[in-house]
């Protein structure tokens, strides 16, 4: 069986600068793949290529065996790839429930169906008690969860999580870890960008490391943790974390 997502020789240039350079790796169906690297390594740029915000300057991206590079974000979402963003931007004047209903309309046509889908996902992400709260009134931890809920409402086969743990306290981090494990338990494939090494090492089946837009390592968490190139480029003193 082929990989769910295949990234083949992807480069992305901005002017003369290579934000990504000949990046190749696969994400296997049902896995959690961690994407790590220093700030500016090209991680979010890669997400933007995968979900269609940018086209690759070179290379191709395949999802379920279908070439998706060159498609628009809404087309890629309809094929089954959802994503969250590093800076969360809910529809601030709308309630938590209505935020998720808006995303649910990608797959359903009636308000009753969209409302049921949204309610189920709010239960799943432990946000149901906040369903009537305007989203701008949520603390950061719950806004991060709402971002995940909105992505899940599109019923994705794969979800891209961009720093879902940034700014969270330890309790909120643990809640987010539990939700991500539940997402995987539902058969959804995950690619996650994260700087918290304990989190990424505990969650990931495989890890890809970028540095200056190039892939410098790939393997299971233990292989990556002990890779001298990774330690030099990124982990440093946190290798024991």
Image (cartoon, rainbow, N blue to C red):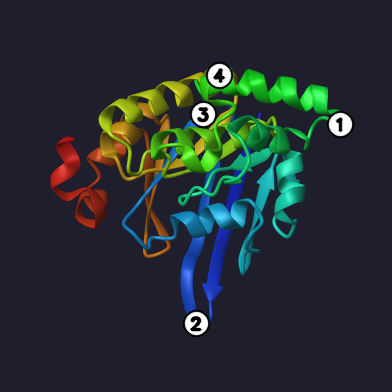
Is residue 219 shown above or below 87?
A: above
Q: Residue 124, can we see it?
A: yes
- Is label 3 or label 1 in front? 1
At numbered mark 4, what does the secondary structure look like: helix, strand or loop?
helix
Q: Quadrant of residue 119?
A: top right
Query: Who comes first in sequence, dot 4 or dot 3?
Result: 3
Rounded to the nearest whole Å, what is the CA distance between mark 4 and mark 3? 20 Å
Q: Is residue 52 left or right of residue 108?
A: left
Q: Which residue does the image show at 42% across and 29% down from the upper left? A: 205
Crowd class of label 4 (few under 14; some 14 to 19; many from 20; radius 10 Å) = some
Q: Pinpoint residue 123: horizontal percent, then vertical percent.
A: 57, 17
Query: Who comes first in sequence, dot 4 or dot 1?
Result: 1
- Is label 2 or label 4 in front? 4
46 and 97: which is toward the camera = 97
- Is label 1 or label 2 in front? 1
Tag 1 residue: 109
Rounded to the nearest whole Å, what is the CA distance between mark 1 and mark 2? 45 Å
Tag 4 residue: 124
235 and 78: which is toward the camera = 78
Q: Pinpoint residue 13: horizontal percent, then vertical percent.
A: 54, 73
Tag 3 residue: 31
């Amino acid at each position: 069986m082929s990989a769910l997502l295949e990234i083949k020789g992807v480069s992305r240039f901005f002017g003369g600068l290579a934000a990504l350079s000949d990046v190749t790796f696969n994400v296997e169906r049902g896995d959690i793949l961690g994407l790590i690297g220093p700030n500016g390594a090209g991680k979010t740029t890669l997400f933007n290529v995968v979900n269609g915000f940018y086209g690759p300057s070179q290379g191709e991206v395949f999802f379920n065996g279908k070439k998706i590079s060159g498609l628009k974000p809404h087309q890629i979402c309809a094929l089954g790839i959802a994503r969250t963003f590093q800076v969360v931007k809910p529809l601030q004047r709308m309630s938590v429930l209505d935020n998720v209903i808006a995303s649910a309309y990608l797959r359903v046509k009636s308000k009753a169906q969209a409302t049921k889908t949204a309610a189920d996902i709010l239960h799943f992400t432990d946000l149901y008690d906040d369903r009537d709260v305007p989203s701008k009134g949520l603390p950061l931890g719950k806004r991060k969860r709402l971002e995940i809920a909105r992505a899940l409402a599109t019923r994705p086969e794969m979800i891209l999580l961009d720093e879902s743990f940034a700014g969270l306290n330890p309790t909120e981090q643990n809640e987010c870890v539990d939700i991500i494990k539940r997402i995987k338990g539902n058969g959804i494939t995950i690619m996650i960008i994260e700087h918290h090494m304990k989190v990424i090492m505990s969650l990931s089946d495989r890890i890809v490391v970028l540095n200056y837009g190039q892939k410098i390592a790939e393997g299971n968490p233990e292989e990556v943790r002990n890779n001298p190139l990774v330690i030099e480029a990124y982990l440093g003193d946190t290798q024991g974390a």
